[in-house]
Image (cartoon, grey):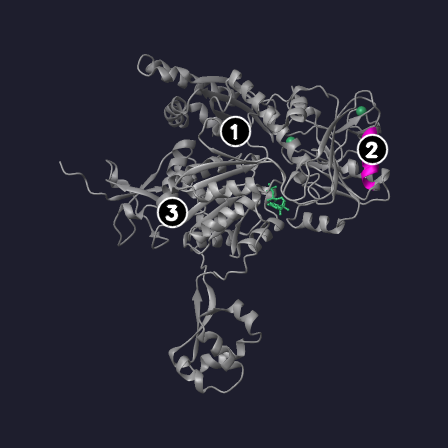
């Protein structure tokens, strides 16, 4: 029997359903596999929706009821080739609805159905008549302009620089048919590429290794803070550009600073396209489209820039590859670093993962030979590594949350004209508002349950309360709601209060607070730091200050209040804390002056601190990897977390119990057929430590397996079944493959 002709389009629509939707082709069009990746407008229920053609196929048995698509939005596919294939892989790997996954590859404006933006820019050129007339033209502006244009088409903004006031002359020439406006691909005008410092031996070896890599080659660039990793990226990117290829650079959310962009632009001498969440939709769509058309040669962006089309790819760089912001934590949960590796393989290009504190996953991959490890063991230039000391504060009086030794060290550093960073990873004024008369404390009504109270953080010198989990805010009560007493007092110290206390204690010096509260605007941090300049002063901050900004005057880093991180239940907590401490410590001693790091703790003998301080990050990582292996945690096991939430506590648990039974049924069916199925373990269901959040009770079921294959075999079976469970209708659920946060 001949195969039925392809007559229907399979369309991915951005809805939370694990399927594609069949449509007849729009009027006048036929279904062809060449249409995959084109945006299409279709009727959907009572409304219209913008979808992406995922493929085509023969009509099914129910073809009679098929609706016809309305129109294609583009002449050629927007999602094509490698990016389309990689997105399909990502949909399979995450077990997420295909329509939501494909839509994620497009910037929001294109997802909504707006036309792909024009990335061309206005320019002028001489007509043939103009070229003929030029020798006979009178002196003056029009002739000057015609002479410039005789040398080639010029973008308007180039003309602004070359011949200020050129516009009337252009109108004159155009009026006589001697010149005409045209639109050219976005400007490829090269600035001047400025040379950087001469690479040292280790840098030169790393650069050479990356430049000579052919095809897919993953590198781990493992270099201490200030060792010149960015220099290595710049050389590798320059080489990639010289070969006529595109480079994609991913940086963490707080790493994408004007400083960094300025350095890239100056050093590479080509336009650098940017993509991050602070840009408007239009700007992001322009970067995306410019990359698709091959006009953008270097794209620097945060997490979602991993979906940039790279038709002429040559290199991918992931800076600070360990950073938590690469993992999307809600909605469609993907990991930008991991997906970048998948794309690099599909594109067959080298990829460089750089960090001073590589993730245990990446270290494991380097140890097992999957990644080529490039080490930069010393600071480049004049920077010297800081000295790190632990201050035991047991039984010592604290003032402003700082021990006397710490205060004296701050005083000394300021007296010597240095800058001091006081690191406290806790925003707000105080973590708790407590009634000293009766013990009442302010709890978030949306995140607390009868079993568990969640304190609200005190802000604005005590006037306002805010929940850091759900964002709920309200004014502080004037008196205790329980006993009506007036003994309400903020307990503990957040960055706001630390700022106040330090300003009172060190009145002669400026004290700046740097956290999400004080730097809402993207350039606010730059302005704050510029205001301080190189005078002596104190910066109080959260992990926002841990990287990104060069703080050359910093001579002392004072770390306070890390003790709670030492005893977290999350198996990744030690890794995160170690990375944070090393990154913060790395802020000191960037310039000529030696730096010092003081770490104040009630647990000076804690093994994590001992190993980290005496042996460094790699010693810590070795110990931690051994423990992960013994406990059967990643990277020695593969995880997937099924989460559910609802207004009441029972439905999430009921749903997850049903999911667990479905897994058991599958394993029973496969027993004797596929022994690996029995390797998949389910842990739970159980409520996470934070059992209620933003008004919803939560529960979770953790799947783990020693290998990816059995885990994904189980999920392939399980996930479609989850949609059909009657219990699913009473909850919001989500699956997180390779979860980073287990709670
Ligand atoms: P990282 O990215 O590892 O933190 P950077 O590339 O930002 O390091 O380099 C840290 C500082 O050292 C920068 O000021 C940089 O200009 C300087 N630097 C890097 N490589 C060299 C070198 N080979 N010689 C002199 N200075 C260098
Ligand atoms: Zn009270
Ligand atoms: Zn809350």
In the current view of this chain or complex, which residue is farthest to the top?
Answer: 672
Local SS, label 2? helix
In the current view of this chain or complex, which residue is farthest to the front?
Answer: 201
Q: Which residue is identified by label 3?
A: 79
Main SS of residues in magenta: helix
Local SS, label 3? loop
| Residue 348 disc label | none
CA separation, marks 3 and 1? 33 Å
Q: Within the magenta stretch, is there residue 410?
A: yes
Relative to residue 343, is residue 646 depicted above or below?
above
Within the displayed image, which quadrant is ligand 1 positioned in?
Answer: top right
Which residues make up the magenta segment? 405-414
Q: Is mark 3 within 8 Å of ligand 1?
A: no
Res 735 seen here: no
Q: Earlier in the sequence, mark 3 or mark 2?
A: 3
Relative to residue 134, is residue 12 depicted above or below?
above
Res 710 seen here: yes
Horizontal and vertical percent for residue 564? 69, 24
Q: Which residue is identified by label 2?
A: 407
Q: Within the magenta stretch, is there residue 238?
A: no
Query: Front-most of 524 and 450?
Result: 524
Q: Nearer the viewer, mark 1 or mark 2?
A: 1
CA separation, marks 1 and 2? 38 Å
Q: Earlier in the sequence, mark 3 or mark 1?
A: 3
Q: Quadrant of the C terminus?
A: top right
Horizontal and vertical percent for residue 94? 43, 32
Q: Residues within 10 Å of mark 1 (few under 14, many from 20)?
A: many
Horizontal and vertical percent for residue 366? 49, 30
Q: Residues within 10 Å of mark 2 (few under 14, many from 20)?
A: some
Q: Which residue is identified by label 1?
A: 363
Q: Residue at x 51, y 69 (%)?
A: 156
Horizontal and vertical percent for residue 314? 43, 47
């Amino acid at each position: 029997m001949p195969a039925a002709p392809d007559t229907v389009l399979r369309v991915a629509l951005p809805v939370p359903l694990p399927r594609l939707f069949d449509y007849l082709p729009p009027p006048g069009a036929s279904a062809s596999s060449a249409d995959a990746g084109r945006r299409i407008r279709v009727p959907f229920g009572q409304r219209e929706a913008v979808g992406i053609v995922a493929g085509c196929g023969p009509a099914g048995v129910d073809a009679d009821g098929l609706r016809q698509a309305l129109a294609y939005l583009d002449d050629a596919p927007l999602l094509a080739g490698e990016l389309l294939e990689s997105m399909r892989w990502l949909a399979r790997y995450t077990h997420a609805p295909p329509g939501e996954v494909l839509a994620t590859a497009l910037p929001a404006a294109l997802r909504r159905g707006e036309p792909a933006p024009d990335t061309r820019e206005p320019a002028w050129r001489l007509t043939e008549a103009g070229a003929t007339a030029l020798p006979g033209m009178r002196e003056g502006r029009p002739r000057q302009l015609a002479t410039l244009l005789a040398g080639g088409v010029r973008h308007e903004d180039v003309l602004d620089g070359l011949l200020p006031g050129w516009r009337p002359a252009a109108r004159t020439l155009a009026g006589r048919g001697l010149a005409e406006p045209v639109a050219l691909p976005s400007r490829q005008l090269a600035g001047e590429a400025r040379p950087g410092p001469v690479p040292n031996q280790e840098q030169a070896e790393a650069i050479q290794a990356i430049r000579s890599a052919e095809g897919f080659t993953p590198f781990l660039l493992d270099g201490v803070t200030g060792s010149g990793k960015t220099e290595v990226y710049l050389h590798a990117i320059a080489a990639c550009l010289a070969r006529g290829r595109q480079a994609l650079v991913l940086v963490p959310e707080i790493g994408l600073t004007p400083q960094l962009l300025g350095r890239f632009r100056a050093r590479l001498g080509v336009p650098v396209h940017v993509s991050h969440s602070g840009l408007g939709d239009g700007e992001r769509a322009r970067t995306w489209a410019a990359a698709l058309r091959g006009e953008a040669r270097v794209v620097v962006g945060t997490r979602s820039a991993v979906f940039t089309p790279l038709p002429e790819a040559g290199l991918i760089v992931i800076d600070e590859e360990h950073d938590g912001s690469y993992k999307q934590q809600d909605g469609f949960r993907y990991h930008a670093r991991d997906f970048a590796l998948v794309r690099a393989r599909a594109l067959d290009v080298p990829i460089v993962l750089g960090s001073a504190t590589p993730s245990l996953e990446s270290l494991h991959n380097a140890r097992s030979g999957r990644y080529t490890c490039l080490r930069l063991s010393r600071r480049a230039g004049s920077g010297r590594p800081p000295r790190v000391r632990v201050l035991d504060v047991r039984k010592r009086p604290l003032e402003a949350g700082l021990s006397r030794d710490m205060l004296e060290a701050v005083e000394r550093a300021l007296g010597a004209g240095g800058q001091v960073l006081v690191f406290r990873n806790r925003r707000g004024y105080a973590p708790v508002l407590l009634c000293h008369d009766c013990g009442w404390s302010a709890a978030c009504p949306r995140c607390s349950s009868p079993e568990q109270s969640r304190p609200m953080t005190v802000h604005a010198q005590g006037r306002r309360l805010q929940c850091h989990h759900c964002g709920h805010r309200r004014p502080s009560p004037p008196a205790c709601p329980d006993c009506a007493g007036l003994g309400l007092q903020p307990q503990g110290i957040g960055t706001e209060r630390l700022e106040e206390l330090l300003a009172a204690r060190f009145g002669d010096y400026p004290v700046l607070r740097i956290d999400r509260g004080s730097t809402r605007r993207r350039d606010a941090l730059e302005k704050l730091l510029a205001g301080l300049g190189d005078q002596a002063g104190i910066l109080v901050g959260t992990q926002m200050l841990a990287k990104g900004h060069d703080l050359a005057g910093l001579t002392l880093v004072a770390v306070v209040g890390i003790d709670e991180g030492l005893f977290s239940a999350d198996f990744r907590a030690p890794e995160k804390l170690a990375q944070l401490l090393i990154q913060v410590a790395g802020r000191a001693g960037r310039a000529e002056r030696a730096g010092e790091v003081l770490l104040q703790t009630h647990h000076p003998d804690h093994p994590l601190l001992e190993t980290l301080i005496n042996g460094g990050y790699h010693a810590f990582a070795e110990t931690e990897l051994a423990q992960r292996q013994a406990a059967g945690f990643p990277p020695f096991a593969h995880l997937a977390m099924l989460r559910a939430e609802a207004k009441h506590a029972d439905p999430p648990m009921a749903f997850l119990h049903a999911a667990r039974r479905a897994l058991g049924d599958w394993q029973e069916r496969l027993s004797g057929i596929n022994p690996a199925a029995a390797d998949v373990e389910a842990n739970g269901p159980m409520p996470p430590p934070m059992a209620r959040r933003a008004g919803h009770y939560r529960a979770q079921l953790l799947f783990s397996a020693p290998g990816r294959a059995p885990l994904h075999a189980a999920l392939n079976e399980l996930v479609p079944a989850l949609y059909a469970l009657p219990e699913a209708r009473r909850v919001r659920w989500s699956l997180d493959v390779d979860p980073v946060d287990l709670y």
